[in-house]
Image: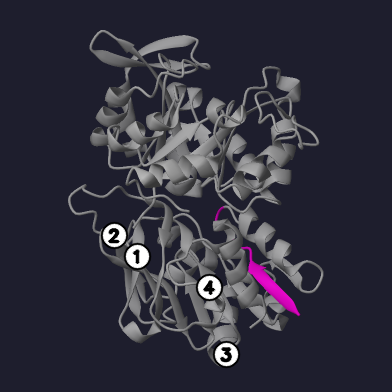
Amino acid sequence: MLKNRIIPCLDVKNGRVVKGINFVDLKDAGDPVEQAKIYSDGGADEICFLDITASNENRDTIYDVVEKTSKKCFVPLTVGGGVRSVDDINKLLNCGADKVSINTAAVQNPEVVVNSSKKFGSQCIVVAIDAKKNGDRWEIFTHGGRNNTGIDALDFAKKMEDNGAGELLVTSMDRDGTQVGYDIDLMSKISSKVNIPVIASGGVGNLDHLVDGIKLGNASAVLAASIFHYGKFSVKEAKEYLNSKGIPVRI
Amino acid sequence: MNVTIVDYNSGNISSVINSFKEVAKDKVNIEVTSDLNKIKSSDKVVLPGQGSFKSCVDALNNINGLVDTLNEFVITNKKPLLGICVGLQMFADIGYEEIETKGLGWISGKVSKIDNQNGKYKLPHIGWNQINIVKESKIFKNIENNSHMYFVHSYEFIPNDKNVISATTDYSSNIVCSVEKENIFGTQFHPEKSDKIGLKIIDNFINL
């Protein structure tokens, strides 16, 4: 039976982890490689890096991070943030990323998704959808949630599937950082709209939220950042909890 | 010993390279090349593959003499080869991804889209699934039955002779996920992404 995945996400800025696990025995809390290794040793099903480097001159730092991590972690590694072109995707894959997530570029230039999935295969193309509720629908935001495009999230999700995306990483902008749980309505609506796996993101504050994301939101995988970073729960604890609730996980 | 990972522009093979180098340490030399002479002289060959069946077959054919060299290595000289993902799928006679495409024909059979039961199951089949070991395979030495492996694919290999199947996995149907036929080994899952247990399979192959 296929297992539901738990994916810890690390925010990386200028090659350093911004929010990280506060373990006392950690030699360098800012080292993304060391943090990723802790997660993979702890049973993470995948690792996600979100590059939030703002300045262009430091953008290359992520390549070095990915290269070093991929030599230490032998679970899938997804990298997103600032991916603009087929060339950017190529560089990340060559450094050892297994999947690349595309956000703003997928909205501005959907051809990037078409061309990259043709060139590298759908299996490594994740489209990251940042959605915010507006009345009875959700709209797509770009540029790290700053720009409202007015595009309907459900239509966009379907379009990205048609364009060749292998997975959708769906983040609720309303819930991100709130720790009140995923936007279940959004997740389940997108999941039933498309036939590709949906990764739920944004809003996790406790382990029941992970359960809800899978059971009610129909997500194939759940992504979380803060609950793991601050040592509130380990990946292992999360998996054991999901297992106790009847959700199939890899233990 | 020399193990060659065939670099034929089949997409992203850095994870395969990293995992083999991690397992090999300094004991085994890992080459990454499409150089025909290097392939001929190596002890073992790894055939990775990402993207579509057609794109991988086209990429193999684009390198002059590569298919002949691989045939000689596998069929004439009977040296060990491990195919991963589409690398395994290409063992078939024919594949139906994008357009009907001829495979290497090493293990008789076809590659078809996984039946998603009218959308009941998501495709690609992405994530960790357990393998049911159905026959002893040299690459499964010290691998427990029902171990989790990482999968990502929408097409499945259906061999004609079921005796080549060494493991299956349960998704929308029972999917062939590992084969062994004499010196030919293949995994539909990605041992290079399947954590320590996956590295053990790579170690088993290197130590054949």
Amino acid identity at mark 4: Ile
Image point (63%, 40%), residue name = A92
**Callout 1 touching callout 2 (CB < 8 Å):** yes
- Seen in the picture, residue B190 relative to B44 is either above or below; the reply is above
Residue B39's x, y, as percent? 68, 76
Amino acid identity at mark 1: Glu
**Marks 2 and 4, how far apart at CA:** 26 Å
Split into 4 quadrants, where in the image is the N terminus of chain A? Answer: bottom left
The reply to whether the magenta stretch includes residue B3 is yes
Q: Earlier in the sequence, mark 1 or mark 2?
A: 2
Q: Earlier in the sequence, mark 4 or mark 3?
A: 3
Is residue A43 among what the camera can see? yes
Residue A45's x, y, as percent? 51, 47
Image point (71%, 51%), residue name = A71
Q: Do labels 1 and 2 share a chain?
A: yes
Q: Which of marks 2 and 4 is nearer the N terminus?
A: 2
Range of magenta residues = B1-11
Residue of label 3: B78
Q: Are marks 2 and 4 on the same chain?
A: yes
Q: Earlier in the sequence, mark 4 or mark 1?
A: 4
Residue of label 4: B143
Local SS, label 4: loop
Residue of label 2: B114
- Tell which subunit mark 2 falls on: B
Q: Quadrant of residue B93?
A: bottom left
Closer to the camera, B193 or A144?
Answer: B193
Closer to the camera, A166 or A245?
Answer: A245
Residue of label 1: B156
Is residue A50 among what the camera can see? no
The reply to whether the magenta stretch includes residue A5 is no
